[in-house]
Image (spheres, rainbow, N blue to C red):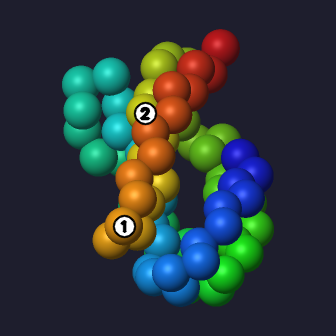
């Protein structure tokens, strides 16, 4: 999964992936640069629905991810 995130506060940004039972599966530190561009390998996830959360101390963004 490719991630692009603007971080004008220059805060530490983290990524979390949860399964459909709200269990934390993956946690990654994305850095604290102004413009964050990363690729995260999710190839080990099984088919199903997941929630991806990206955030810093100021903002949190939640996305639904479906692997079929």
Name which quarter of the figure residue 12 lies in.
bottom left
Residue 19 in the figure: left or right of residue 47:
left
Percent from the top left, x then y, of residue 2? 75, 52
C-alpha gap between disc 1 and disc 2: 19 Å
Q: Residue at x 44, y 39 (%)?
A: 62
Residue 38 in sight here: no
Q: How many labels does the image show?
A: 2
Asked if the residue under mark 2 is in contact with the one under mark 1, i.e. CB atoms within 8 Å, the reply is no
In what quadrant of the picture does the C terminus appear? top right
Tag 1 secondary structure: loop
Tag 2 secondary structure: strand
Q: Earlier in the sequence, mark 1 or mark 2?
A: 2
Percent from the top left, x then y, of residue 50? 45, 28
Circle 2 Cα neighbour tier, 10 Å, few/some/many (<14 / 14–19 / ≥20): some
Q: Residue at x 33, y 22 (%)?
A: 20
User: 46 or 31, which is in the foreground?
Assistant: 31
Q: Which residue is drawn at 29% across and 46% down?
A: 24
Circle 1 Cα neighbour tier, 10 Å, few/some/many (<14 / 14–19 / ≥20): few
User: 12 or 19, which is in the foreground?
Assistant: 12
Percent from the top left, x then y, of residue 37? 75, 68
* Residue with the mark numbered 1: 58
- Disc number placed over residue 51 in the picture, else none: 2
Q: Nearer the viewer, mark 1 or mark 2?
A: 1
- Disc number placed over residue 2 in the picture, else none: none
Residue 57, compared with residue 16, is above or below; it is: below
Percent from the top left, x then y, of residue 65? 56, 27
Residue 19 in the figure: left or right of residue 7:
left
Residue 49 in sight here: yes
């Amino acid at each position: 999964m490719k991630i692009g995130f603007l971080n004008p506060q220059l805060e530490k940004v983290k990524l979390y992936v949860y399964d459909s039972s709200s269990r934390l599966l993956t946690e990654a530190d994305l850095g604290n640069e102004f413009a964050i561009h990363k690729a995260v390998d999710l190839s080990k996830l099984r088919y199903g629905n997941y929630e991806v959360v990206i955030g810093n101390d100021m903002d949190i963004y939640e996305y639904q991810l479906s692997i079929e």
